[in-house]
């Protein structure tokens, strides 16, 4: 059973997304407790769906909300924050008419079926950010990124990174090699048989190399892994039924089919040449996110990720947009070992039997051996079919130590982000944006990365509620 029979109750998390979020201009932020660490200097950027309703109509899926960016700058003078919607053309059109006009991941376009044909999908620009030297990109996996001013968050328009075709997908999970500054990313170009586009950019974002890898059907690939000299993709057995989605009869989300008789496909590319190294298959599962990957001393590829037994997670995330969820979708942390030459899985073990998501590692170890994983977890004892992720944690798979930062009932921290201390390389901080459902306010909370289970070192107030966001990045000063 994946659906609970318990009575549904409206939980505190729903209040954060009940109303469209309110923008605010650059504002000095009050310190609520503690002190901003002297070595915490830089900017936090986060992206997430901020508007889930228009003209009295709710979106079809949490992923459909218009993206808004929160920026928080930490300087010697204190913290300032600003929050602005990404001004996509679809957002502007819908603002003008005050109604939803376009199709999206989880909703079909307005109007009768014959009016939907050929109507573009709205670029929601709501999933993550990529920080480049001269701009911030708001990412959405179905299209081009949008470029924003790093200071004012003013939207400059879509950005093709000199090579992307019009509407070409550029996913929300690029990987930056901390040694070379190269940026790797991908996009799934739709088609009867889709194409996996893989991109390599220089440190300015300019695409310098790209390849196309054929896929079977139209699968959902959300994230990938940079592991040493390899790029690794797990293609789960989810396929879009193009008959219904292509004709506009149902949304992409509703046209996705979990095909449990299919394998999870493994695609391994060489990061230098982007050439195919191997393809393999393994048992069916679904994953949204990887925490990291690396090549071990024996030559095997090691990968940690959050694994689901099926695609019920999409149903749960769809229900989030309604303010009440009722589907149990438990993703847990797994470790996989691969032989890069054959694409075969040589080991597959569960690291932590606890529902979690948003696993990340410090940016300086991406693609290299790493130990500690920062992630979002559910609070102890809650009904995960009705609740939202309510705590953050650090997990060490070698020692099994799990340090949890639980801010109490009705408090919802988002994906934890690691920020290295500018003065002491041994020191790190973990930043999260918390929605406090008790006071209906949002705040930034900073923890010592070595002491997540102790009091936060600092809490900074925000002037308006920031809806639960998906992903962000830290930009050192
Ligand atoms: Fe993601």
Image (cartoon, rainbow, N blue to C red):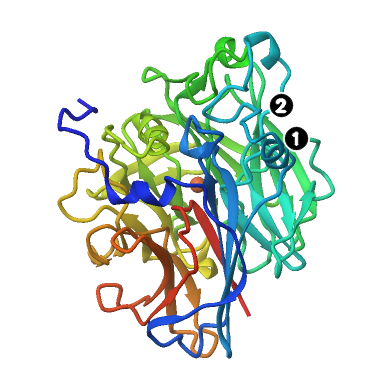
Q: Which residue is mark 2?
A: 120
> Residue 426: x percent and y percent?
44, 84
Q: Quadrant of the C terminus?
A: bottom right
State the residue at coordinates (60%, 25%): 215
Query: In the visual, does 394 lie left or right of 462?
Result: left
Find out whether the residues at labels 1 and 2 contact each other: C-beta distance under 8 Å.
yes
SS assignment at label 1: loop
> Residue 206: x percent and y percent?
80, 55
Residue sitting nearer the eye, 459 or 26: 26
Residue sitting nearer the eye, 19 or 404: 19
Tell me if I can see residue 343 in this picture.
yes
How far is disc 1 from disc 2 in space, using C-alphas?
9 Å
Q: Which residue is mark 1?
A: 167
Mark 1 packing: few (<14 Cα in 10 Å), some, or many (20+)?
A: some
Mark 2 packing: few (<14 Cα in 10 Å), some, or many (20+)?
A: some
Query: In the visual, does 115 lie left or right of 427?
Result: right
Residue sitting nearer the eye, 298 or 272: 272
């Amino acid at each position: 059973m994946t659906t609970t029979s318990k009575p549904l109750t409206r939980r505190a998390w729903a209040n954060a997304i009940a109303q469209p979020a309110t923008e605010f201009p650059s504002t000095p932020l009050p310190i609520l407790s503690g002190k901003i660490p002297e070595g915490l200097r830089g900017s936090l950027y986060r992206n997430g769906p901020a508007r889930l309703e228009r003209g009295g109509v709710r979106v079809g899926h949490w992923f459909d909300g218009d993206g808004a960016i929160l920026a928080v700058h930490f300087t010697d003078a204190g913290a300032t924050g600003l929050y602005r919607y990404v001004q996509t053309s679809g957002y502007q059109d819908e603002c003008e008419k005050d109604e939803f006009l376009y199709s999206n991941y989880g909703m079909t376009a307005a109007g009768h079926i014959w009016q939907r044909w050929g109507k573009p999908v709205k670029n929601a620009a709501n999933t993550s950010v990529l920080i480049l030297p001269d701009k911030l990109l708001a990412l959405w996996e179905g299209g081009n990124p949008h470029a924003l001013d790093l200071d004012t968050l003013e939207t400059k328009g879509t950005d093709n990174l000199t090579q992307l075709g019009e509407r070409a997908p550029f996913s929300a999970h690029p990987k930056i090699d901390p040694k070379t500054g190269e940026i790797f990313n991908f996009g799934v170009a739709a088609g009867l048989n889709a194409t996996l586009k893989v991109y390599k950019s220089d440190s300015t974002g300019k695409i310098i190399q790209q390849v196309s890898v054929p896929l079977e059907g139209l699968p959902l690939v959300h994230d990938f892994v940079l592991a040493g000299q390899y790029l690794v993709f797990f293609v789960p057995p989810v396929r879009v039924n193009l008959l219904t989605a292509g004709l506009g009869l149902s949304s992409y989300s509703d046209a996705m089919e979990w095909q449990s008789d299919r394998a999870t496909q493994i695609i391994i590319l060489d990061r230098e040449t982007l050439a195919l190294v191997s393809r393999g298959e393994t048992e069916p599962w679904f994953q949204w996110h990887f925490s990291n990957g690396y090549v071990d001393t024996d030559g095997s590829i090691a990968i940690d990720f959050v694994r689901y037994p099926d695609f019920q997670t999409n149903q749960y995330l769809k229900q989030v947009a309604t303010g009440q969820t009722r589907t149990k979708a438990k993703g847990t942390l797994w470790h996989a070992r691969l032989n890069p030459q054959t694409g075969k899985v040589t080991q597959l073990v569960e690291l932590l039997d606890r529902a979690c998501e948003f696993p990340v590692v410090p940016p300086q170890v991406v693609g290299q051996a790493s130990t500690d994983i920062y992630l979002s977890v559910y609070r102890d004892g809650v009904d995960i079919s009705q609740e939202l992720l309510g705590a953050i944690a650090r997990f060490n798979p070698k020692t099994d130590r799990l340090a949890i930062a639980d801010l109490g009932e009705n408090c919802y921290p988002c994906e934890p982000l690691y920020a290295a201390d500018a003065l002491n390389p041994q020191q790190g901080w973990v930043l999260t944006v918390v929605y406090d459902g008790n006071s209906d306010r949002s705040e930034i909370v900073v923890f010592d990365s070595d002491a997540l289970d102790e009091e936060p070192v600092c809490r900074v107030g925000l002037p308006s509620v920031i809806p639960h966001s998906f992903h962000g990045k830290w930009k050192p000063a």
